[in-house]
Image (cartoon, grey):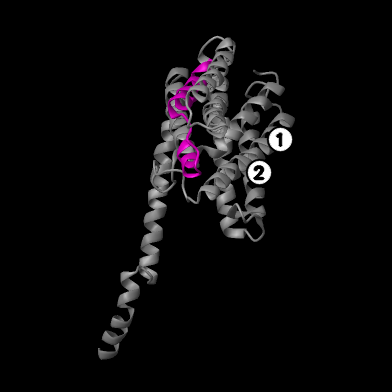
Amino acid sequence: MDKYERKRDEREELRLEGGTRSSRVRSGTEKLLTRTLSGLFYSVTVLVCIFWGPVPCAVLFCAMAWLCCSEFFRIARMLGRMPNELIGLTAAVAFVVCPLLPDVALMVVFSLLVLSCGVWFVWTARASISDAAITVLGPVYTGFLLSSVMYVRVIDIPSQPMPVAALLTFGVISSIWMSDAAAYFVGQRFGRHKMVPKISPHKTWEGFAGGMVGSVFVWLIMWVVGLPCVTLPLALLGGVCVGAVGVIGDLFESRLKRAAGVKDSGNFLPGHGGMLDRTDSILFGSMTAFFILRLGGLL
Protein backbone atom coordinates (compact mmCIF):
# COMPACT_ATOMS: atom_id res chain seq x y z
CA MET A 1 0.00 0.00 0.00
CA ASP A 2 2.83 2.40 0.87
CA LYS A 3 4.44 1.70 -2.49
CA TYR A 4 1.14 2.43 -4.24
CA GLU A 5 0.73 5.72 -2.34
CA ARG A 6 4.27 6.84 -3.20
CA LYS A 7 3.72 6.03 -6.86
CA ARG A 8 0.44 7.94 -6.84
CA ASP A 9 2.09 10.97 -5.24
CA GLU A 10 4.84 10.91 -7.87
CA ARG A 11 2.24 10.93 -10.63
CA GLU A 12 0.05 13.60 -9.04
CA GLU A 13 1.69 16.51 -10.86
CA LEU A 14 1.55 14.62 -14.17
CA ARG A 15 -2.14 13.86 -13.54
CA LEU A 16 -2.95 17.50 -12.82
CA GLU A 17 -1.28 18.51 -16.08
CA GLY A 18 -3.31 15.91 -18.01
CA GLY A 19 -0.22 13.91 -18.97
CA THR A 20 -1.31 10.45 -17.83
CA ARG A 21 -2.46 7.84 -20.33
CA SER A 22 -6.05 7.92 -19.10
CA SER A 23 -6.09 11.73 -19.33
CA ARG A 24 -4.74 11.66 -22.86
CA VAL A 25 -7.29 9.05 -23.91
CA ARG A 26 -10.13 11.05 -22.35
CA SER A 27 -8.94 14.31 -23.91
CA GLY A 28 -8.51 12.70 -27.32
CA THR A 29 -11.96 11.11 -27.16
CA GLU A 30 -13.57 14.42 -26.17
CA LYS A 31 -11.87 16.23 -29.03
CA LEU A 32 -12.93 13.55 -31.50
CA LEU A 33 -16.55 13.65 -30.32
CA THR A 34 -16.61 17.46 -30.41
CA ARG A 35 -15.12 17.52 -33.89
CA THR A 36 -17.48 14.79 -35.14
CA LEU A 37 -20.67 16.32 -33.76
CA SER A 38 -19.73 19.82 -34.93
CA GLY A 39 -18.82 18.54 -38.39
CA LEU A 40 -22.03 16.49 -38.56
CA PHE A 41 -24.18 19.51 -37.71
CA TYR A 42 -22.37 21.61 -40.31
CA SER A 43 -22.67 18.93 -43.00
CA VAL A 44 -26.36 18.25 -42.37
CA THR A 45 -27.15 21.98 -42.45
CA VAL A 46 -25.37 22.38 -45.80
CA LEU A 47 -27.07 19.36 -47.36
CA VAL A 48 -30.55 20.34 -46.12
CA CYS A 49 -30.19 23.83 -47.61
CA ILE A 50 -28.87 22.45 -50.92
CA PHE A 51 -31.89 20.19 -51.40
CA TRP A 52 -34.38 22.67 -49.93
CA GLY A 53 -33.95 25.07 -52.82
CA PRO A 54 -31.80 27.82 -54.37
CA VAL A 55 -32.98 30.53 -51.95
CA PRO A 56 -32.24 28.62 -48.70
CA CYS A 57 -28.94 27.57 -50.26
CA ALA A 58 -28.13 31.21 -51.05
CA VAL A 59 -29.00 32.29 -47.50
CA LEU A 60 -26.66 29.67 -46.04
CA PHE A 61 -23.78 30.48 -48.37
CA CYS A 62 -24.26 34.21 -47.80
CA ALA A 63 -23.74 33.56 -44.09
CA MET A 64 -20.71 31.40 -44.85
CA ALA A 65 -19.25 34.07 -47.14
CA TRP A 66 -19.75 36.72 -44.44
CA LEU A 67 -18.02 34.59 -41.79
CA CYS A 68 -15.16 33.55 -44.09
CA CYS A 69 -14.54 37.13 -45.21
CA SER A 70 -14.72 38.39 -41.62
CA GLU A 71 -12.12 35.81 -40.53
CA PHE A 72 -9.93 36.72 -43.50
CA PHE A 73 -10.04 40.37 -42.45
CA ARG A 74 -9.21 39.34 -38.87
CA ILE A 75 -6.05 37.65 -40.12
CA ALA A 76 -5.27 40.71 -42.26
CA ARG A 77 -5.56 42.99 -39.20
CA MET A 78 -3.18 40.73 -37.31
CA LEU A 79 -0.73 41.25 -40.17
CA GLY A 80 -1.00 45.04 -39.78
CA ARG A 81 -3.53 45.77 -42.54
CA MET A 82 -6.67 47.87 -42.03
CA PRO A 83 -9.28 46.76 -44.60
CA ASN A 84 -12.68 48.42 -44.90
CA GLU A 85 -14.83 45.63 -43.52
CA LEU A 86 -18.16 47.23 -44.39
CA ILE A 87 -17.30 47.34 -48.10
CA GLY A 88 -15.68 43.90 -48.10
CA LEU A 89 -18.38 42.03 -46.18
CA THR A 90 -21.17 43.61 -48.22
CA ALA A 91 -19.47 42.57 -51.45
CA ALA A 92 -18.85 39.03 -50.16
CA VAL A 93 -22.58 38.54 -49.57
CA ALA A 94 -23.52 40.26 -52.86
CA PHE A 95 -21.29 37.89 -54.86
CA VAL A 96 -23.19 34.86 -53.53
CA VAL A 97 -26.54 36.40 -54.48
CA CYS A 98 -25.44 37.15 -58.08
CA PRO A 99 -26.38 33.72 -59.53
CA LEU A 100 -30.02 34.42 -58.57
CA LEU A 101 -29.98 37.70 -60.50
CA PRO A 102 -29.46 38.64 -64.18
CA ASP A 103 -26.01 37.96 -65.64
CA VAL A 104 -24.96 41.60 -65.41
CA ALA A 105 -25.17 41.47 -61.60
CA LEU A 106 -21.71 39.94 -61.24
CA MET A 107 -20.09 42.76 -63.23
CA VAL A 108 -22.05 45.33 -61.23
CA VAL A 109 -20.81 43.91 -57.92
CA PHE A 110 -17.21 43.80 -59.13
CA SER A 111 -17.41 47.37 -60.40
CA LEU A 112 -19.02 48.73 -57.25
CA LEU A 113 -16.48 46.91 -55.08
CA VAL A 114 -13.51 48.45 -56.88
CA LEU A 115 -15.17 51.88 -57.11
CA SER A 116 -16.08 51.88 -53.40
CA CYS A 117 -12.54 50.92 -52.44
CA GLY A 118 -11.18 53.65 -54.70
CA VAL A 119 -13.37 56.31 -53.10
CA TRP A 120 -12.52 55.08 -49.62
CA PHE A 121 -8.79 55.07 -50.41
CA VAL A 122 -8.90 58.62 -51.80
CA TRP A 123 -10.82 60.08 -48.88
CA THR A 124 -9.13 58.16 -46.03
CA ALA A 125 -5.67 59.48 -45.30
CA ARG A 126 -4.69 56.58 -43.05
CA ALA A 127 -5.59 53.95 -45.68
CA SER A 128 -2.73 52.47 -47.69
CA ILE A 129 -2.89 50.82 -51.09
CA SER A 130 -2.35 47.50 -49.30
CA ASP A 131 -5.47 48.12 -47.21
CA ALA A 132 -7.48 48.81 -50.37
CA ALA A 133 -6.09 45.69 -52.06
CA ILE A 134 -6.95 43.52 -49.05
CA THR A 135 -10.46 44.99 -49.02
CA VAL A 136 -10.94 43.80 -52.61
CA LEU A 137 -9.20 40.44 -52.13
CA GLY A 138 -11.29 39.45 -49.10
CA PRO A 139 -14.71 39.27 -50.80
CA VAL A 140 -13.24 37.93 -54.06
CA TYR A 141 -11.44 35.12 -52.21
CA THR A 142 -14.53 34.21 -50.17
CA GLY A 143 -17.83 35.42 -51.68
CA PHE A 144 -16.88 35.27 -55.35
CA LEU A 145 -15.41 31.78 -55.09
CA LEU A 146 -18.38 30.55 -53.05
CA SER A 147 -20.73 31.92 -55.71
CA SER A 148 -19.61 29.03 -57.92
CA VAL A 149 -21.63 26.70 -55.68
CA MET A 150 -24.72 28.81 -56.35
CA TYR A 151 -24.08 28.86 -60.11
CA VAL A 152 -24.23 25.07 -60.05
CA ARG A 153 -27.30 25.07 -57.79
CA VAL A 154 -29.40 27.30 -60.08
CA ILE A 155 -29.04 25.08 -63.17
CA ASP A 156 -32.47 24.54 -64.73
CA ILE A 157 -33.04 21.35 -66.75
CA PRO A 158 -36.82 20.82 -66.82
CA SER A 159 -36.64 17.66 -68.94
CA GLN A 160 -34.79 15.75 -66.22
CA PRO A 161 -36.88 13.64 -63.81
CA MET A 162 -34.42 14.11 -60.94
CA PRO A 163 -33.24 17.28 -59.17
CA VAL A 164 -30.08 17.64 -61.26
CA ALA A 165 -28.94 20.96 -59.79
CA ALA A 166 -29.20 19.77 -56.19
CA LEU A 167 -27.50 16.46 -56.96
CA LEU A 168 -24.65 18.12 -58.83
CA THR A 169 -24.13 20.62 -56.01
CA PHE A 170 -24.25 17.79 -53.49
CA GLY A 171 -21.74 15.83 -55.57
CA VAL A 172 -19.31 18.73 -55.88
CA ILE A 173 -19.38 19.51 -52.14
CA SER A 174 -19.21 15.81 -51.23
CA SER A 175 -16.16 15.25 -53.44
CA ILE A 176 -14.31 17.98 -51.57
CA TRP A 177 -15.37 16.65 -48.17
CA MET A 178 -14.43 13.11 -49.17
CA SER A 179 -11.05 14.33 -50.40
CA ASP A 180 -10.38 16.09 -47.08
CA ALA A 181 -11.51 13.10 -45.01
CA ALA A 182 -9.57 10.54 -47.05
CA ALA A 183 -6.43 12.70 -47.00
CA TYR A 184 -6.68 13.05 -43.21
CA PHE A 185 -7.14 9.35 -42.42
CA VAL A 186 -4.65 8.08 -45.00
CA GLY A 187 -2.12 10.68 -43.90
CA GLN A 188 -2.60 9.75 -40.24
CA ARG A 189 -2.14 6.05 -40.96
CA PHE A 190 0.41 5.94 -43.75
CA GLY A 191 1.85 9.46 -44.01
CA ARG A 192 5.65 9.52 -44.16
CA HIS A 193 6.67 12.08 -46.75
CA LYS A 194 5.85 15.71 -45.96
CA MET A 195 4.41 17.90 -48.71
CA VAL A 196 5.17 21.42 -47.49
CA PRO A 197 6.32 21.19 -43.87
CA LYS A 198 7.00 24.92 -43.60
CA ILE A 199 3.35 25.71 -44.34
CA SER A 200 1.40 22.65 -43.17
CA PRO A 201 3.59 20.17 -41.25
CA HIS A 202 0.90 17.47 -41.07
CA LYS A 203 0.19 17.21 -44.81
CA THR A 204 1.85 14.27 -46.56
CA TRP A 205 2.05 13.01 -50.11
CA GLU A 206 0.39 9.77 -48.98
CA GLY A 207 -2.53 11.79 -47.64
CA PHE A 208 -2.65 13.76 -50.88
CA ALA A 209 -2.92 10.51 -52.87
CA GLY A 210 -5.69 9.32 -50.56
CA GLY A 211 -7.54 12.59 -51.09
CA MET A 212 -7.33 12.18 -54.86
CA VAL A 213 -8.85 8.70 -54.63
CA GLY A 214 -11.67 10.02 -52.43
CA SER A 215 -12.49 12.86 -54.79
CA VAL A 216 -12.39 10.66 -57.91
CA PHE A 217 -14.61 8.10 -56.14
CA VAL A 218 -17.42 10.65 -55.62
CA TRP A 219 -17.17 11.93 -59.20
CA LEU A 220 -17.39 8.34 -60.46
CA ILE A 221 -20.60 7.92 -58.45
CA MET A 222 -21.95 11.03 -60.19
CA TRP A 223 -21.16 9.35 -63.51
CA VAL A 224 -22.69 6.01 -62.48
CA VAL A 225 -26.03 7.58 -61.39
CA GLY A 226 -26.24 9.27 -64.79
CA LEU A 227 -26.01 12.96 -64.01
CA PRO A 228 -26.15 15.00 -67.25
CA CYS A 229 -22.85 15.64 -69.02
CA VAL A 230 -20.85 13.77 -66.38
CA THR A 231 -19.10 11.28 -68.65
CA LEU A 232 -16.38 8.91 -67.50
CA PRO A 233 -13.50 11.12 -68.80
CA LEU A 234 -15.12 14.20 -67.22
CA ALA A 235 -15.58 12.35 -63.91
CA LEU A 236 -11.91 11.35 -63.84
CA LEU A 237 -10.80 14.86 -64.79
CA GLY A 238 -13.16 16.48 -62.29
CA GLY A 239 -12.12 14.19 -59.45
CA VAL A 240 -8.41 14.79 -59.95
CA CYS A 241 -8.65 18.54 -60.57
CA VAL A 242 -11.11 19.30 -57.77
CA GLY A 243 -9.10 17.20 -55.31
CA ALA A 244 -5.78 18.79 -56.26
CA VAL A 245 -7.02 22.39 -56.34
CA GLY A 246 -8.87 21.85 -53.05
CA VAL A 247 -5.50 21.04 -51.45
CA ILE A 248 -4.10 24.30 -52.86
CA GLY A 249 -7.02 26.14 -51.23
CA ASP A 250 -6.20 24.47 -47.92
CA LEU A 251 -2.51 25.39 -48.21
CA PHE A 252 -3.39 28.96 -49.21
CA GLU A 253 -5.29 29.45 -45.97
CA SER A 254 -2.58 27.67 -43.97
CA ARG A 255 -0.05 30.11 -45.42
CA LEU A 256 -2.21 33.03 -44.27
CA LYS A 257 -2.51 31.64 -40.74
CA ARG A 258 1.18 30.85 -40.49
CA ALA A 259 2.06 34.40 -41.56
CA ALA A 260 -0.24 35.74 -38.82
CA GLY A 261 0.97 33.21 -36.26
CA VAL A 262 -2.45 31.69 -35.51
CA LYS A 263 -3.61 28.08 -35.45
CA ASP A 264 -7.22 28.68 -36.51
CA SER A 265 -8.97 31.46 -38.39
CA GLY A 266 -11.65 31.60 -35.68
CA ASN A 267 -13.63 29.47 -33.24
CA PHE A 268 -17.05 29.30 -34.89
CA LEU A 269 -17.04 25.49 -35.23
CA PRO A 270 -15.84 23.62 -32.10
CA GLY A 271 -13.10 21.17 -33.01
CA HIS A 272 -12.69 22.65 -36.49
CA GLY A 273 -11.75 26.27 -35.84
CA GLY A 274 -13.34 29.00 -37.90
CA MET A 275 -15.63 28.87 -40.92
CA LEU A 276 -12.68 29.67 -43.19
CA ASP A 277 -10.84 26.63 -41.80
CA ARG A 278 -13.81 24.45 -42.76
CA THR A 279 -14.41 26.10 -46.15
CA ASP A 280 -10.89 26.71 -47.49
CA SER A 281 -10.93 23.65 -49.77
CA ILE A 282 -14.47 24.37 -50.97
CA LEU A 283 -13.51 27.90 -52.07
CA PHE A 284 -10.98 26.70 -54.63
CA GLY A 285 -12.49 23.27 -55.30
CA SER A 286 -16.02 24.46 -56.12
CA MET A 287 -14.78 27.03 -58.62
CA THR A 288 -12.72 24.30 -60.29
CA ALA A 289 -15.80 22.05 -60.44
CA PHE A 290 -17.77 24.90 -62.02
CA PHE A 291 -15.29 25.14 -64.89
CA ILE A 292 -15.13 21.34 -65.25
CA LEU A 293 -18.92 21.22 -65.61
CA ARG A 294 -18.78 24.05 -68.15
CA LEU A 295 -16.25 21.98 -70.06
CA GLY A 296 -18.81 19.20 -70.11
CA GLY A 297 -21.39 21.57 -71.61
CA LEU A 298 -23.75 21.63 -68.64
CA LEU A 299 -23.41 25.27 -67.56
User: What residue lies at 42% left-to-right and 21% top-to-bottom?
Assistant: 56
User: Residue 108: where, in percent of width, then height?
Assistant: 55, 13
Type of the residue with mark 2: Met
Instruction: Specify whether residue 81 is painted magenta.
Output: yes
| SS at circle 2 | helix
User: Residue 6: where, in percent of width, then height?
Assistant: 29, 87
For residue 236, which numbered disc appears in the image? 1
* Residue 96 in the figure: left or right of residue 42: right
Q: Spot the residue most to the front.
A: 125
Principal SS element in the magenta part? helix
Type of the residue with mark 1: Leu
Q: Spot the residue most to the right.
A: 233
What residue would you read off at disc 2?
A: 212
Q: For the residue carrying disc 1, how many other residues have a C-alpha within 10 Å: few (<14), some (14-19), or many (20+)?
A: some
User: Residue 277: where, in percent of width, then height?
Assistant: 49, 42
Q: Is residue 255 above or below residue 138?
A: below
Q: Nearer the viewer, residue 214 or 84?
A: 84
Instruction: Specify whether residue 236 is painted magenta.
Output: no
Q: Is residue 296 above or below residue 72?
A: above
User: What residue lies at 57% left-to-right and 39% top-to-bottom?
Assistant: 281
Q: Is residue 84 above or below residue 14?
A: above
**Part of the protein shown in magenta:** 73-99
| Residue 219 image-quadrant placement | top right
Q: For the residue carrying disc 2, how many other residues have a C-alpha within 10 Å: few (<14), some (14-19), or many (20+)?
A: many
Confirm or deny contact between disc 2 and disc 1 (CB under 8 A): no
Q: Nearer the viewer, residue 55 or 189?
A: 55
| Residue 105 seen | yes
How many marks overall? Answer: 2
Q: Nearer the viewer, residue 18 or 173?
A: 18
